[in-house]
Image (cartoon, grey):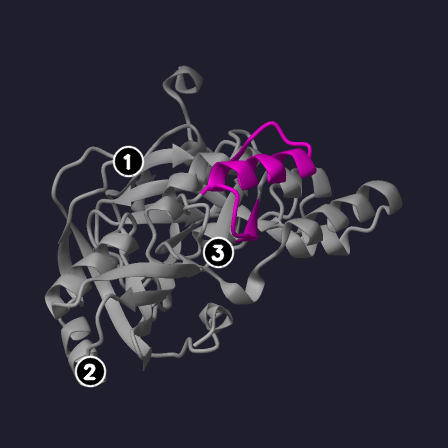
Amino acid sequence: MSSDDIRCDHVGSAGMLPSEYPRELVIKKQAQTNPSYGCPPAERPVMEYIERGVVNLDKPRGPTSHEVTAWVKDILELNRAGHSGSLDPGVTGVQPIMLGKATKVVSALRLSGKEYICLMSLHEPASEKKVRSVCKEFSGPVFQMPPVISAVKRELRVRMIYYLEVLEVKDKSVLMRVGCEAGTYMRKLCHDIGAALGTGAHMQQLRRTKTGPFREDTLVTLQELKDAYVFWKEDGEECHIRRVVRPLEEGLSHLPRIIIRDSAVDAVCQGASLAVPGIVSLDSNIKIGDEVCLLSLKGEAVSLSRSLMDTEEMLRSEHGLAASTERVIMVAGTYPQGWKSKARET
């Protein structure tokens, strides 16, 4: 088994992150959008498109996540950029980087599920049957203590392993695919598997293959990003930069959606909660307390909100508050005010 094997020829369809579970958009009311206001995300002017964009970067081995984020910011001549969860210098793969004004929603990606291809090295030989049997025991909740050098407080915590699939066992090398909750330490997982096997083990190589909605098939290298930006700046070619930078809405596509009518948009942008009459359609599996993304009829992200009703209640109700606004994404005034203030009423 060579180190090149870790580049995910083995990734299959078995096992899904929670954000990948099937969802269906259910229509509550028919509504139309006024073309005079707002703009479909893919049609934003290039500079605004970049400022409200995300790059699914293929992080190389060597630099830290902070370093590659700084390089992306410099390449695109931006004041701000933020990454969606750190990767150690030796780890490669999916590293979404939110750009400019999109950095305000980076927390939604940091908390999304992750998938890794991990090459684990056993300290002593073990039968393939035993390896596969023990690894099965590590699906579900696991207890982990963050390492001494970490960005979080050292206290025992529970992390969910959504799936752990052993792809290949050869001598003392074990190649596995792991879908897990954000904040799971893969080095600790390998150590614990080795302890359960009685052989000892350590993580030899790691590549991240998914972060929320981002996968390997849309990865962009630093060189591709640089070339695309230069082509646009020097020759006015937009197609390349629109390919390597994607609208921030794609970085939120793992969240349950609520589509709202034009008249409700500005109230949410002012920090108001979403009332049921403002709902046009919504995902079929929303539960009370879920983080949801409110979208305009043009597909623009309006806010990150917290659901106060489940899907069934939102569809059934004609009044009441459906979601509380936690983080406004769209600039107030993008859509006309569709509500009356007390000052205007007097």
**Sequence-wise first label, 3 or 1:** 3
Q: Is residue 141 visible?
A: yes
Can you tell which of label 2 and label 1 is closer to the viewer?
Answer: 2
In the figure, is residue 122 to the left or right of 222? left
Which callout, 3 or 2, points at the residue further toward the start of the chain? Answer: 3
9 is higher (above) or lower (below) than 33:
below
In the foreground, 344 or 297: 297
Image depth: mark 3 or mark 2 in front: 2
Query: In the image, is residue 7 above or below residue 150?
Result: below
What residue appears at the point 19 percent right and 50 percent down from the top-left corner? 288
Local crowd at mark 3 within 10 Å, few (<14), some, or many (≥20)? many
Report the residue at 75% width, 45% height from top. 229
In the picture, measured across the screen, residue 14 lies left or right of residue 210, that is left
Q: Is residue 71 magenta?
A: yes
Residue position marked by numbered label 3 in the rendering: 94
Point out residue 108 in the picture as x, y percentages from the top left corner: 37, 44
- For label 1, the crowd category at 10 Å Cα-Cα, with few meaning under 14, some 14 to 19 and many 20 or more, is few
Q: Quadrant of residue 126?
A: bottom left
Which label number is shown at residue 149?
A: 1
Q: Nearer the viewer, residue 202 or 244?
A: 202
How many discs mark residues in the rendered view? 3
Disc 2 residue crowd, few under 14, some 14–19, many 20+, Cα 10 Å: few
Q: Amino acid at mark 1?
A: Ile
